[in-house]
Image (cartoon, rainbow, N blue to C red):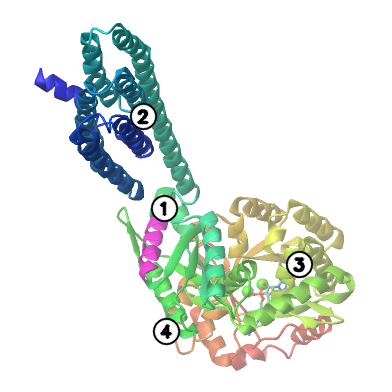
Amino acid sequence: MFRRLRAFLAVDAENRELIRAQQAAFTRQIPLLYVMLMVNAVALAATHFKIAPLYLTVYAPLALCLGCCIRIHGWWLTRQTEADHSQAVRQLQSIVYVGIAIGTGFTVWSLSLFPYGDAYTQSHVAFFMAITVIGCIFCLMHLRTVALMITAVVLVPFTLFFLSTGNPVFMAIAINMAIVTIPLVYILLKHYDVFTKLIESQKAILAKQEQLQALSDDNRRLANIDSLTELPNRRQFRTEFVRRLQHASERQGTLAVGIVDLDGFKPVNDAFGHAVGDKLLMEAARRLRAFAEQGVFAARLGGDEFGLLIENDQSDLDLKSLADRICASLREPYCIKGITAKVSASLGLVSFPEGGQNAVQLFERADFALYHAKQYGCGQAILFSEEHAHQITRRSRVDQELKNADLEKELSVLFQPFVDSQTLTTIGFEALARWDNPSLGRITPDIFIPAAERAGLMSQMTLALFTKALDAARQWPDGTRLSFNLSAKDIVSSATIDAILTMLAKSGFNASDLDFEVTETSVMANFELASSNLTRLMDHGIGIALDDFGTGQSSLSHVHRLPLRKIKIDRSFITYIDTNVLSRNIIRTIVDLCRNIDCVCVIEGMETQEQVTILRLLGCGVMQGYYFGRPMPLEETLVRLQNEARPDSGNLAAAVA
Ligand code: C2E
Ligand code: CA
Ligand code: CA
């Protein structure tokens, strides 16, 4: 029985939200309840002041009011501080017991006043008790148990007491009050029910909201993360870049932006499959993440490209050394599923504020530096410099001029001879384009060919140059070969290939004396299409030469699948051939490879007699370099061919030997 009563009086401590809501309601209502009680008590004490003893009209109400004031003070303090859950439970629990105590105190006190005075003052006691019950029910609505207990503590003695007076008016008041209390208690219970349900539904809404928030946080995270490497993705990189740039400019600090591109990733992917490729990217990402401690924020921009933001106010020298360490780390072998794959990484860097002012410009410049890193130093980091800025300005001027250029008039072709390495007689010429612009002067092809590709003028330019080359080649003796360079754009354009074939047929030049030179990189950009177009050319009897061999990214399996007649070993391999054994061994291996796949081996770029002597010993078939002749105009080619045709010529071979 006692335990049940305790349970009934206990506060539902498990329901945290309900406790919080009850506490919030009471913090406002309880002080009001005490004020109301005190005002009522003072009024009752005043009407009995002269007729009842002092201990009932002064001391007892004073003691009760003091109790009320202490409680008001307690609640006032709660208002100032945020109570934690257990404090709130204790406070609510205290209302139950303190409420019963104070309720009993007021009941006993008011009933003790009843015997004094006349009918009016006695009615005041009845009124005091009735109004107190109603006030308590209203103010304590949010804690059902207290409201009910206090109602019981006041109402039961009130009803019994007044019924026992035998006075019909007081008896009527007592019955009347008991009857009025019934609907009041009913409303109290209903209200409490609605209140708890409201809290429950608020709780459910809150839980739903939290769930939605978690879901949207998850979505945001996924939208900003690269699912393979778990690095931030391009979108996150962009946001972070803009944020850090803003921060750097506000605190007048520096920020470096880098773009990393893995060299040789595609062949690994092609040779070992995507599963190995994916693992390699994950490992590369892990290595980049390890630089976080050194202030490097890394993101995957797509494919085998990563973006870096470096934010620790470094000097250019420190930055370069950090970038070199990043490249070195990415160059370490990758051991995946029993395979050891090797790739290197090129890194283009630019630093704010010297290297550029805004995000777009900085990113473009990092990309430009990366292009240089890839072009001139695979596996290296290159920091954007003033020289690069100068090149960009020049590049944009070239782009501008190219749009208005009269290609037919301004373009011309020079011819560089290539010779048989045994007889050293001229076999043919490579056509090399030149552009003479009225305002820019002479521009070399490595500048204007990429510009023409950017401007979408490549096909037009190739056809103009090819016409000029054919016109010249027709003037050479039969059997003199013509080599013509095709760009990456040309070999994937079926329309350009069609036009070239038509042009060739019209010219009457012998297709079997013609070679088209293509670079590894241009073929690799779209291997299937390039390969099918090259096969079409080959079907017409034209030879295909793989240019700049050894500088691109192709794998031998691709070389094998191309319809090649010639392989041209890049000039960079022979620069140190007279001093470097490794260079000689590489050339010897490629010469062997050419022999095995039945290709003519052409070596480019010999400038000295020593180089020529060594190359002849290594057994390459054809040579082309300044030693045998620089690119020359048509007239000079004709003189050269004429001279060689003279019976007294032919002592060049003897001179070299
Ligand atoms: P490439 O096809 O590798 O051409 C050989 C380049 O090396 C030529 O530069 C040539 O002058 C240079 N060279 C030849 N022998 C030596 C040597 O002994 N020492 C040195 N230092 N250089 C030597 P060029 O004429 O400036 O051409 C550069 C590149 O522009 C060419 O490289 C080729 O990729 C491209 N190109 C030239 N003409 C055309 C063209 O008509 N169409 C296309 N698509 N590209 C062309
Ligand atoms: Ca070439
Ligand atoms: Ca070449």
Residue drawn at x 73%, y 82% is 631
* Element type where label 2 sits in the image: helix
Which residue type does callout 1 highlight?
Glu
Asked if residue 409 lies left or right of residue 150, the reply is right
Q: CA distance from mark 1 to mark 4?
A: 45 Å
Q: Nearer the viewer, residue 454 or 615?
A: 454
Q: Nearer the viewer, residue 294 or 491?
A: 294
Ligand 3 shows up in the quarter that is: bottom right
User: Which stretch did the figure color magenta?
Assistant: 280-293
Q: Is residue 539 above or below residue 424?
A: above
Whether residue 375 can be seen here: yes
* x then y, percent, for residue 246: 56, 68
Q: Nearer the viewer, residue 466 or 435?
A: 435
Residue drawn at x 83%, y 80% is 436
Residue drawn at x 48%, y 89% is 578
Q: CA distance from mark 1 to mark 3?
A: 39 Å
Q: Main secondary structure of the magenta part?
A: helix
Asked if residue 572 lies left or right of residue 325, the reply is right
From the image, tell me which residue sits under label 3.
Answer: 452
Name the quadrant of the N terminus: top left
Name the quadrant of the C terminus: bottom right
Q: Is mark 2 within 8 Å of ligand 1?
A: no
Q: Nearer the viewer, mark 4 or mark 2?
A: 2
From the image, tell me which residue sits under label 1.
Answer: 230
Q: CA distance from mark 1 to mark 2?
A: 57 Å
Q: Residue furthest bottom?
A: 655
As for residue 282 lying within the magenta part, the answer is: yes
Q: Is mark 4 within 8 Å of ligand 1?
A: no
